[in-house]
Image (tube, grey):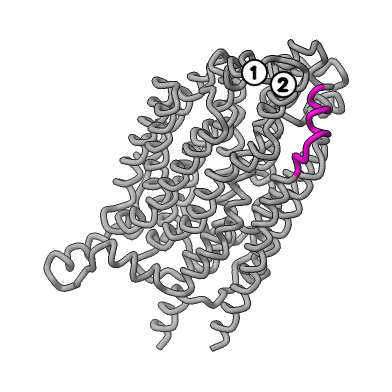
Amino acid sequence: MSDSKDTYADNDLREVKQLGMWASIASLSYIFWIVGGMELVERIAYYGVKASAGLYAKAPTSEGGLGISLSDYGIIIAIWAFMQTFIPVFTGGVSDRVGYKETIFASTIIKIAGYLVMAFFPSFYGFLIGAILLAGGTGIFKPGIQGTLVLSTGRQNTSMAWGIFYQVVNIGGFLGPLVAVHMRQLSWDNVFYACAAIISLNFLFLLAYKEPGKEERMERNRKIKAGEIHQEALWRDAWHELKKPVVIYYMLVFAGFWFLFNSLFDVLPIHIAEWVDTSVIVTSLFGPEGTSNGIFQFWLGLDNTGTKVMPEGMLNLNAGMIMTTCFLVAALTAKYRITTAMLGGCLLSIFAFVLIGATNAAWMIVLAIAMFSFGEMMISPKKNEFMGNIAPEGKKAMYLGFVMLPQGIGWTLEGYFGPKLYEMYASKEIFSLELLAERGMSASEISAIPQGEAFTTLVAFTGEPAQELTTLLYNSHNIGMAWYIIAAIGTISAVGIYLYGKWLFKLQQR
């Protein structure tokens, strides 16, 4: 009787009492820290490119950028998002059957190829193909890492394990953009070469990696070959699990949050670069002369003159907060039902986007990023914990691949519509072209301006200071509308999470 009860508890919707914080940390095995290290390295490389992708896309070719419109950038991001988030739905099952070590190895090679293609071919199609390779590699990488984590932890320490894992990988998310800030000030291709070199470190981690549950997987494969166990085709097996209401509803209600989430990384760096005077922050911290201290310049993501915070440096507050405080939030939210914690996180994130839309004051943007970060810490580790808990035995990685489905829907839609929304309501490039026409520049001269150089042309044409023109353009357009629309999408998701939580609670009472 007790055996069946224990088996059921590993695979149901009921919550299990968690160990205390220090007891949970002490109970984590060495393999947990190995996969944490691999994820950290992968995130340094990944966010080195992701955090600066929008800035690279809109930078004029004269500065080594792609010099493409935000609409074209949106096409790249949408395809990248679709590939990266839908591939794990099927590769998760492959990892369960083939082996986690093998899929992690293959994914690392594919990701190296993606970074090198971006470096060698600085064009729309070069970056697109590089992004597809990067997306494919990431989609293959994730289920093996997360499946290992699930098999190397128990239900009593799972909440703290996911919280610490999320904290550890955000060290990578913190360091990646800092690498990009300083590499791109040398040249853009250096960003991609550096990321290819960094991800290669995972081959060293693989030497120390031992797959948990490998004997059980090999025995299961032996029985399948011997005809003792019937195994469905992988796509049919995945489809059977996907049709379960608990998975379908999860996928629908969280898609809106992931639209919100990815807007922060795809669009906010562009917004900060165009509208936020980050020199105010440096002046507050170091005085009007800024700082020439290289340590401060690196860790705060400052430009080489030490007088302003680069957009990636601003956004890095997100990873920095998660890196230092996620385990505390994990300990706090372990006391609440999973869906309650996720709802609270979604609401905090919505308020952050409203604040971004309401002001371009640098310190208020810092506050908004901080609010969003707390919201993310309440929701993001919990999604993996939730799916890992309800996954049937032998399908842990498959279900952790399903975690990517709402992210895939939300990010794919945001990848396409987020930059378009921004271009419609907040594009400095378009507003500069319109003001040039108002100030008397001929249509032929305006059409000859290279993509990405409209504002610098406006400054040169009018002779007015850049900051004054930025303020004029900001005050004469409803730039916040793009962020309010994104917040509204998140609000729909919050209502869905609330209803989903109530439905799950009723299921648990049966």
Residues under labels 1 and 2: Cα distance?
7 Å
Q: Is residue 474 on the magenta stretch? A: yes
Instruction: Give the x, y percent position of residue 259.
Output: 59, 51
- The secondary structure type at the circle numbered 2 is helix
**Mark 1 touching mark 2, by CB under 8 A?**
yes
Instruction: Give the x, y percent position of residue 25.
Output: 58, 56
| Residue at left offset 71%, top offset 55% | 350
Instruction: Give the x, y percent position of residue 359.
Output: 82, 40
Q: Which residue is mark 2?
A: 437
| Residue at left offset 53%, top offset 38% | 74
Q: Decide: is 22 above or below 232.
A: above
Label 1: few (<14), some (14–19) or many (≥20) C-alpha neighbours in 10 Å: few
**Residue 295 appears anywhere in the view:** no
* Residue type at the position of mark 2: Ala
Q: Decide: is 123 above or below 482.
A: above
- The secondary structure type at the circle numbered 1 is helix
Q: Residue furthest left?
A: 226
* Residue type at the position of mark 1: Ala
Span of residues in magenta: 469-480
Is 294 placed left or right of 355 in the picture? left
Q: Which residue is mark 1?
A: 443
Dot 1 or dot 2: first in sequence order is 2
Q: Decide: is 426 above or below 247.
A: above
